[in-house]
Image (cartoon, rainbow, N blue to C red):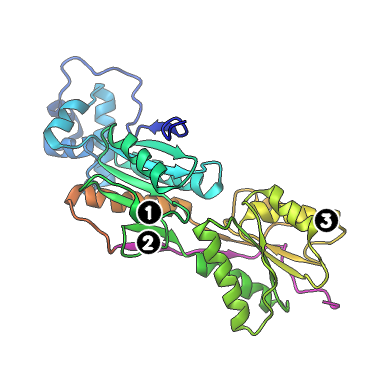
Amino acid sequence: MSTTERSSTLAWSGARPTGRKKGPGASMADVAALAKVSSQTVSRVSNGHPSVREETRERVLKAMETLGYAPNEAARALRYGKFGTIGLIAHRLARTGESRTVEGVVEAARTLGLTVTLVDVLAPTSDDMTAAVAQLTHQSIDGLIIIRSELSATENIALPPRLPVVVSDSRLIGSRPAVGTDQSQGARLLVEHLLALGHRTVHHLAGPLDSGPAQERSDTWAQVLREAGRDVPEIGVGDWTAHSGYVWATSLDIGGVSAVFCANDEMAAGVVRGLHERGCRVPQDVSVVGFDDVALAGYLWPPLTTVRQDFQKIGSELVRLLAEQMDTGRHLSDVHVTVPVELLVRESSAPPPATA
């Protein structure tokens, strides 16, 4: 089976639905007159230029809707060398981080009037990613966003020359324009929170071994424990799912375990259930914390202590860096944006029991 067959492609349009066909005789000049702006401003709005004020953009879009006007995309591409479309390559969209980052990208692109074409690859290998890039470039894109490629060598992906590219990966400093969450800060906040509560050490259920974010969180967990002069327990490995957290918790030797840092919230939910079935109360017997702050984290029982990743911000920063390259033609390889996280302390973490 080819890579193209093993991937799925979706597209979102940034154009606002009008419910009407293009009105006969409606022109750019008509839109400009109704919106009380210049034809150049109408052109900039049509092309998603970031220099247009939001108030003006809304006024022009409303005039377009009133007149039933839509720019001729083919003519615009020929004239400006732009297609108004960006490509987006993701891996495992079922996972929280990927899906919410994609949502952020789509929303940010919509504000610029850009269409997003998505290819979801099953394996983040250089060959599969290169095939996905080729699939997108054949569909005429102005730029490309790659959502986290795990531990595959992103620099080995074959990219068309001069194609603007931005990557969502906190490890690619100086390689490509990148936007990433401060994984290390998040893990440090959680482990230090548990140690400050009085826990002698913190056990850890990590994400998959091929995951860059999972590795960063695990490395920081061990580093913080060593800095505090604490024992570093044997690490557990999950696959981001609640099931893997549940299985790990049901087989865990719970003697001496008073705190568990799970690499994401889904695994933490599974750990909480697994501990409950073994007669361990959370947090009275064992504190459990997660990572991400998924929508259900605050509604689990007990509500989950975690760190919040701002996926919306990640998506908007990816589009901002890509649009800047598309507009200026400059390659921003030295630009790296790190989005901070926020510690959210809820009821799943507490001081250890007196006998711990």
| Dots 2, 1 in contact, CB < 8 A | yes
- Is 106 situated left or right of 227 in this image? left
Name which residue lies at 49% across and 59% down: 212
| Dots 1, 3 in contact, CB < 8 A | no
Name which residue lies at 53% across and 56% down: 210
Amino acid beneath label 1 = Thr
Q: Residue 88: x, y in percent?
A: 37, 42
What's the mark number on residue 172? 2
Q: Nearer the viewer, residue 61 or 247?
A: 247
Q: Is residue 268 above or below residue 99?
A: below
Q: Which residues are magenta?
A: 335-356
Quarter where residue 290 is shown: bottom right
Q: Earlier in the sequence, mark 1 or mark 3?
A: 1
- At mark 2, the secondary structure is loop
- At mark 3, the secondary structure is helix
Disc 1/disc 3 C-alpha distance (Å):
41 Å
The total number of labels drawn is 3
**Prevalent SS, magenta region:** loop
Task: Give the crowd class for mark 1: few <14, some 14-19, many >=20 residues within 10 Å.
Answer: many
Mark 3 highlights which residue?
Answer: 276
Disc 2/disc 1 C-alpha distance (Å):
8 Å
Name which residue lies at 21% across and 38% down: 47
Q: Residue 233: x, y in percent?
A: 70, 72
Q: Residue 165: x, y in percent?
A: 29, 50
Q: Nearer the viewer, residue 319 or 130?
A: 130
In the image, residue 351 lies in the stretch drawn in magenta: yes
Q: Earlier in the sequence, mark 2 or mark 1?
A: 1
Name which residue lies at 80% across and 58% down: 251
Discs 2/1, front: 1
Mark 1 highlights which residue?
Answer: 154
